Image (cartoon, rainbow, N blue to C red):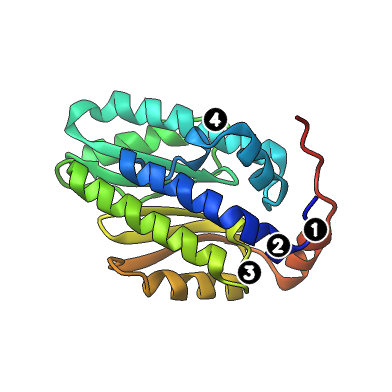
């Protein structure tokens, strides 16, 4: 059992980096839970600031959202759906404003979704090269968060689109500013957008000191 916060981050850092690098090779965006093994997901889930119910619902929203978005855009667009604590971020490219609105309506209609941040761009679908570059940026940002001793790296979800890094998570304003500062210094990052759910420093202390659920094998 690893009790130290920094010991846990040091132990998880090479695993997380390797996982996100696999995503880079496959040109995946924001789908961390989709390809991580259950044992690793369990470790991350134990230190997540969401409830286990919210984590499960976020994965369900993401899966349903990707399917619904694909039905709307087909081959005419490319949509990424990220969900954190039931708040959804849409990134990618769509054909026109009507398609952008249609995707948002479909996602808003998914059970459990609290809000939708629609960052879809009116443009042709991005290339494989562009998506691979964005995935590499995501991996660099994730690794830098794990290296930062003043951040809980597991509290952030990172999505990159055309060099713009979107940061999600339940964080304090101090943590959010620090994360944005780190991300903005990564090579290839053009812009950083905060899509946080803010909590107080007192909330952070309560969450940090709360007993962690036991993960069954």
Q: Measure the alpha-carbon separation of dots 3 and 2.
A: 22 Å
Instruction: Identify the residue position indicated by label 1 in the image.
Output: 3
Q: Measure the alpha-carbon separation of dots 4 and 3.
A: 26 Å
Instruction: Identify the residue position indicated by label 3 in the image.
Output: 172
Residue 77 screen position, x and y as percent? 21, 36
Q: Is residue 10 above or below residue 88?
A: below
Packing grade of label 2 (10 A; few <14, some 14-19, many >=20) is few
Residue 51 falls left or right of residue 37 = right
- Is label 1 in contact with label 4 (beta carbons under 8 Å)? no
N-terminal of the two: label 3 or label 2? 2
Mark 3 or 2: the one toward you: 2
Res. 39 mark: none
Q: Measure the alpha-carbon separation of dots 1 and 2.
A: 7 Å
N-terminal of the two: label 4 or label 2? 2
Identify the residue shown where x is 69% and y is 65%.
Answer: 6
Q: Measure the alpha-carbon separation of dots 3 and 1.
A: 23 Å
Q: Measure the alpha-carbon separation of dots 1 and 4.
A: 30 Å
Q: Nearer the viewer, residue 194 or 211?
A: 211
- Is label 1 in contact with label 2 (beta carbons under 8 Å)? yes
Q: Is residue 126 visible?
A: no
Q: Secondary structure at mark 3?
A: loop
Res. 60 mark: 4
Mark 3 or 1: the one toward you: 1
Q: Secondary structure at mark 2?
A: helix
Mark 1 or 4: the one toward you: 1
Identify the residue shown where x is 39% and y is 31%.
Answer: 66
């Amino acid at each position: 059992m690893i009790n130290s916060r920094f010991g846990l981050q040091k132990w998880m850092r090479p695993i997380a980096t390797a996982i996100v690098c696999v995503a880079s090779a496959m040109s995946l965006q924001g789908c961390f839970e989709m390809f991580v093994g259950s044992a690793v997901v369990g470790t991350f889930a134990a230190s997540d600031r969401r409830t286990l119910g919210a984590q499960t619902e976020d994965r369900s929203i993401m899966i349903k959202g990707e399917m619904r978005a694909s039905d709307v855009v087909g081959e005419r667009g490319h949509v990424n759906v990220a969900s954190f604590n039931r708040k959804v971020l849409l990134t990618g490219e769509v054909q026109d404003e009507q398609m952008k609105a249609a995707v948002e309506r479909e996602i808003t209609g998914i059970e459990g979704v609290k809000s939708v941040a629609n960052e879809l761009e009116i443009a042709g679908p991005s290339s494989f090269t562009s998506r691979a570059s964005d995935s590499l940026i995501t991996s660099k940002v994730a690794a830098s968060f794990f290296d930062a001793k003043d951040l809980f790296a597991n509290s952030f979800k990172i999505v990159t689109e055309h060099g713009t890094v979107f940061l999600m998570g339940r964080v304090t304003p101090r943590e959010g500013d620090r994360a944005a500062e780190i991300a903005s210094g990564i090579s290839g990052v053009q812009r950083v957008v905060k899509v946080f759910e803010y909590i107080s420093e007192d909330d952070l202390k309560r969450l940090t000191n709360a007993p962690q659920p036991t993960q069954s094998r």
